[in-house]
Amino acid sequence: SQTIHQWPATLVQPVGSPLSLECTVEGTSNPNLYWYRQAAGRGLQLLFYSVGIGQISSEVPQNLSASRPQDRQFILSSKKLLLSDSGFYLCAWSLGVGGGLVDEQYFGPGTRLTVT
Amino acid sequence: ELKVEQNPLFLSMQEGKNYTIYCNYSTTSDRLYWYRQDPGKSLESLFVLLSNGAVKQEGRLMASLDTKARLSTLHITAAVHDLSATYFCAVDMRFGNEKLTFGTGTRLTIIP
């Protein structure tokens, strides 16, 4: 069966510090990978997604970046955090089914980031 | 650009009552997903609807999809407290570059 891991689970970082969040998937090959952010009490904002190694699509211009160094690893980074980067970061995976369509997405447990 | 709207955004209802959450989307799609999120937790998949007229039921929840109306509904029957959560619909647009577009979410609170 497939499993998705995220770490750390919680993180408190000062403004201006760097960030690295990691997501790994087990039990599947060549998944699509996604990073979402959820501000407190709000909906989901898609940040980045990847359909293959080294392929990153950015949805929102900001001070964050993403990388996919391995098939089942997705990393979210920042060089300098802003207060507005606080939120709940969710990684998800799915499989493409052709025609630009995807199967359902499966979410990781999330990382709660507080920027102080 | 695909837009997905849910209503209501907030719903407070008494135990034992029935209610419906609506998910409208703006472009052609025949793949729609419902998710549940408990406070402080991640999203959990509830239903996968892959064709016009699809209906899925699990316990007190039933989801349906009308692709011609671009509408999905999540019906709650005889609500119980443990259904309190935020519910999201998500739509997969044809030729949508392999990503889902999520609705704004409906925060459901069941009052004893």
Image (spheres, coloured by chain):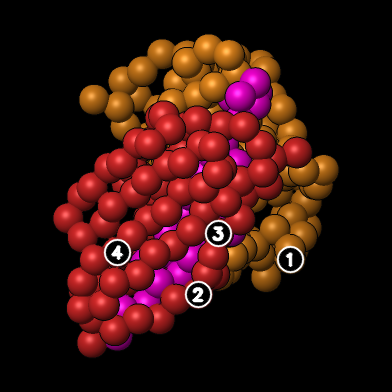
Chain colours: A orange, B red
How many circles with numbers are drawn on the protein? 4
Q: Can you say whether B19 is above or below B51 in the image?
A: below
Do the dots labelled 2 and 4 sit on one chain? Answer: yes
Residue drawn 35% across the image and 81% down it: B13
Q: Describe residue B81's horizontal placement relative to residue A102 as left or right.
A: left
Residue drawn 34% across the image and 49% down it: B63
Question: Which amino acid type is shown beneath numbered disc 3?
Answer: Gln
Q: Secondary structure at mark 2?
A: strand
Q: Secondary structure at mark 4?
A: strand
Q: Main secondary structure of the magenta part?
A: strand
Find the magenta span and give its range: B85-111
Question: Which amino acid type is shown beneath numbered disc 2?
Answer: Phe
Query: Which of disc 4 and disc 2 is earlier in sequence?
Result: 2
Tag on residue B6?
Answer: 3
Tag on residue B76?
Answer: 4
Q: CA distance from mark 1 to mark 4?
A: 38 Å
Q: Secondary structure at mark 1?
A: helix
Q: CA distance from mark 2 to mark 4?
A: 14 Å
Circle 2 residue: B10
User: Which quarter of the rendered picture does the C terminus of chain A lie within?
Assistant: bottom right
